Image: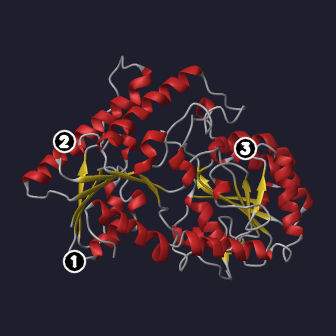
Amino acid sequence: MRILFVHQNFPGQYKHLAPALADDLANEVVAIGDEANIHRARGLHPRMRLCSYPASQDAVAGTHHYLRSTDAAVRRGQAVARLALKLRNLGFVPDVICAHPGWGESLFLKDVFPNAKLVLYLEFYYRAQGSDMHFDPEFPSTFDDGCRIRMRNATQLLSLEASDAGVSPTQWQRAQFPAMLRQSISVIHDGVDTDIVCPANVERFQLPGGATLRSGDEIITYVARNLEPYRGIHTFLRSLPEILARRPLAQVLIVGGDDVSYGRAAPGGATYRAIYLQEVAASIDMSRIHFLGKLPYAQYVQVLRLSSAHVYLTYPFVLSWSMLEAMSCGCLLIASATAPVQEVLQHGRNGLLVDFFDPSGLAGTVIKALEQPEENRHLRQQARLDVQQRFDLKRVCLPQLQDHVRAAAGLPPL
């Protein structure tokens, strides 16, 4: 079987699937990614061929603001199509194409390879109501925002029309797509390597200032790719004055960068971290809050292993890998009662749910959890067990993903 992977930030969600398919000597695997990002995949697998296309240019002056993302998507799609034509001329014609449609790369692949089966990774379909938009009154959406995201969906809809199958990581994410298209979308998560992401004692974790922490210390953890409202950084930081006042030995570890992955940038060139820290700075001991930035994966897992209470907050949006990884590490998870969190977390069974907009309520839940660690041990144990049973990479998700690709090619399951 010949498989082509296409993702501007390759490997992205194909980090495990692409190498697993390349392990099979009967397969030939080629991957296409943005030239600015493809270096991250170097060495991923010796039998995988990597190709890159030039980064797309910005929309030309005068492009309607509803169409700027569409313009960028068409440019990416064109660049990928030209590269795909070169591959075809060199004799590579895939049986299956696995692509993320969000950036336009899959727009013209069926025009190059009309007989290939196109399998899309369907991460998120934008809606003006019922998900991230109009969710947070502190960041109100406008009528223009709704029109803009409707046009942003045009890229995905064109790719979906040409696709043969799709996969979404959660039921809620699948349900955001139009009802007439859902029958072709399977729900299979990317998976968590529970053998690596697992509970363990940490004897020494060094902080940027030189101090060290270890398992048994009272440590509150928070993780996001970037510290921004979509992942509740404003609610979390506003909860800290009460938490730190009531728990004098607690330390707070915050993992994430200061860029913006989702939503609009902070005003005036500031960062959301700076804005909300300034709001609470007079009420907290800053020496007990440690911003670790973006960590190497092994260090990030150590942070989760240290955790006495792990806070995960999100708008109704894409479910973060970090939430499931925290559960896999046996963290006591305190998370927002939002979709798709509630698809995985049940209050009092495998974690605790809080109101996204209630810093005081979050603080009270964290404080009570820290006061009663033994009473909450069953939540930690059940959280790990649930991830092992539903989201384990090697035993559950990766076999399902491989069979999904094989089925698209008309091959039997492994």
- Answer above or below: position of 156 versus 116: above
Report the residue marked by disc 1. 25
How many labels sit on residues?
3
User: Quick one: SS at disc 1?
Assistant: loop
- Say which quarter of the image contains residue 275: top right
Report the residue marked by disc 2. 111
**CA separation, marks 1 and 3?**
49 Å
Horizontal side of 332 relative to 200 (left or right) equals: right
* Crowd class of label 3 (few under 14; some 14 to 19; many from 20; radius 10 Å): many
Q: Is residue 213 visible?
A: no
* Crowd class of label 1 (few under 14; some 14 to 19; many from 20; radius 10 Å): few
* Disc on res. 8: none
Residue 259, image x, y percentages = 55, 45
Front-lying residue, 235 or 244 = 235
User: Quick one: SS at disc 2?
Assistant: helix
- Answer above or below: position of 124 versus 269: below
- Say which quarter of the image contains residue 279: top right
Q: Earlier in the sequence, mark 1 or mark 3?
A: 1
**CA separation, marks 2 and 3?**
45 Å
Front-lying residue, 155 or 53 = 155
Mark 2 or mark 3, which is nearer to you?
2
Amino acid type indicated by mark 2: Asp
Mark 1 or mark 2, which is nearer to you?
2
Q: Do the CB atoms of the residues marked 2 and 3 lie less than 8 Å apart? A: no
* Crowd class of label 2 (few under 14; some 14 to 19; many from 20; radius 10 Å): some
Residue 278, image x, y percentages = 76, 41
Amino acid type indicated by mark 1: Leu
Residue 85, image x, y percentages = 13, 47
Horizontal side of 195 relative to 2 (left or right) equals: right
Report the residue marked by disc 3. 234
Q: Is residue 113 visible?
A: yes
